[in-house]
Image (spheres, rainbow, N blue to C red):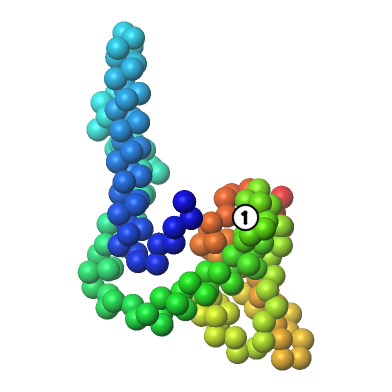
Amino acid sequence: MNERFSDPRKLIDELRKLTRAYVSLLETGRDRILMHGGTCDSVEDMERGDPALSRARMAIDGAEIELRHAPAPSAQRGAELLEDVENLRHMLGATYPNKQREWGYRNYYCANLGNKSMERLEQAGLVIKGRVSGDQAYYHATEAGCKTAGLDARQIRRALNRD
């Protein structure tokens, strides 16, 4: 399934489902340990002690608060966001036909100066402007840009020449 989540509410809903599935795995693991005579912390203790689960829940809660207070994005803004993410992913080689294991093999995007998408990405801290030649500039993804494009830690190191 290659569904796009242009509506943040759908993404939040999917993240909530993922956290529930994770807790369900904790419950299943605990039940199996107890069934075989072992001892195990309570699921509540495991949830409280899991920093990734805590951060995911805080991110979901924060996003929901922002959505409640933010005006609904216009159709044009939604299209701009999609364009920006597509450009960011292209910059990092995170698009078809590249295999996911190859993502981050490059980190540049040549665009005309004044390119609105690159300006938005730069303002958001997702790219930095590099070498300028005439009326064009090379843009490079930051670590935050790599994360936004969906790269994992190894791919980010490769994209940022840290490996």
Taking 38 as reference, is 106 left or right?
right
Residue at image location 33% in from the left, 9% down from the top: 36
- Which residue bears the numbered disc 1? 156
| Image height of 142 relative to 73, above or below | above
Write down the quadrant of residue 90 in the picture: bottom right
| Image height of 8 relative to 157, above or below | below
| Image height of 11 relative to 44, above or below | below
Taking 112 as reference, is 13 left or right?
left
Write down the quadrant of residue 8 in the picture: bottom left
- Judging depth in this view, the residue of 13 and 141 nearest the camera is 13
Callout 1 amino acid? Ile
- Judging depth in this view, the residue of 150 and 156 nearest the camera is 150
Taking 53 as reference, is 156 left or right?
right
Using the rendered image of the protein, determine whether residue 137 is visible from the camera's viewpoint.
yes
Residue at image location 33% in from the left, 30% down from the top: 26
Specify few, some or many for label 1: CA neighbours under 10 Å numbering under 14, 14-19, or 20 or more.
many
Residue at image location 65% in from the left, 68% down from the top: 91
Residue 139 image offset from top left, x and y in percent: 66, 75
Residue at image location 55% in from the left, 65% down from the top: 145
**Residue furthest toward the right?**
133
Residue 117 image offset from top left, x and y in percent: 55, 80
Residue 23 image offset from top left, x and y in percent: 31, 35
Image label count: 1
Taking 9 as reference, is 155 left or right?
right
Residue 136 image offset from top left, x and y in percent: 71, 86
Q: Secondary structure at mark 1?
A: helix
Using the rendered image of the protein, determine whether residue 104 is visible from the camera's viewpoint.
no
**Residue furthest toward the front?**
1
